[in-house]
Image: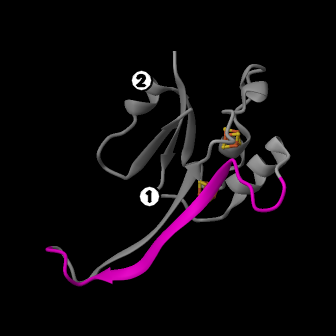
Amino acid sequence: MTKAILINYEYCTGCHSCEVACKKHLGLPAGEFGIKLSETGPYEYRGAPEGPGRWEWTWLPVITKACDLCESRTEKGKMPACVQHCQAWCMYYGEVSELAAKMDGETRWALFTK
Ligand code: SF4
Ligand code: SF4
């Protein structure tokens, strides 16, 4: 059974709490991350068929090679540190099949596995 983290990044506010919680969990030094926010935008779509008037400004946390899916926490029944500290409650942990079932096509999702 494969565990994963699902992020509904339509609702990510870019608060960095997942980054900080993860760095503390993994004990990483400055400049290294288990999860790292990426930012796209802000810009207005002028050339796309549905633009102008549509804007892109997206935050997406990307899980890195350092991530151990918080095994030491989840084996005790705790949530991964990043999921627990997400201010927007837009992160989920669980089985890939259960998480994939949440991907409803209504918002933008990213599914990460080890
Ligand atoms: S699951 Fe744990 S190790 Fe992986 S990104 Fe989240 S906090 Fe970091
Ligand atoms: S804690 Fe949640 S809302 Fe904040 S940056 Fe991470 S995924 Fe986005």
- Specify few, some or many for label 1: CA neighbours under 10 Å numbering under 14, 14-19, or 20 or more: some
Vertical relation: 56 (above or below) 83: below
Q: Is mark 2 within 8 Å of ligand 1?
A: no
* Residue placed most toward the observer, 34 or 99: 34
Q: Is residue 37 left or right of residue 56?
A: right
Between circles 1 and 2, the one closer to the viewer is: 2
* Residue placed most toward the observer, 32 or 39: 32
Quarter assignment of residue 38? bottom right
In the image, residue 96 lies in the stretch drawn in magenta: no
The residues tagged by marks 1 and 2 sit, at their Cα atoms, a distance apart of 21 Å
In the image, residue 40 lies in the stretch drawn in magenta: yes
Residue drawn at (74%, 47%), measured in percent from left and top? 22
| Magenta stretch bounds | 29-49
Q: Quick one: which residue is furthest to the left in this view?
A: 49
> Residue 70 at what x, y percent from top left?
72, 32
Vertical relation: 80 (above or below) 3: below
Q: Which mark is residue 10?
A: 1
Q: Is residue 111 left or right of residue 3?
A: left
Residue drawn at (19%, 81%), measured in percent from left and top? 47
Chain-order first, disc 1 or disc 2 = 1
Residue type at the position of mark 1: Glu
Q: Which mark is residue 97?
A: 2
Q: The C terminus is located in which quarter?
A: top right
Q: Secondary structure at mark 2?
A: helix
> Residue 52 at what x, y percent from top left?
22, 84
Residue drawn at (74%, 19%), measured in percent from left and top? 75
Residue type at the position of mark 2: Ser
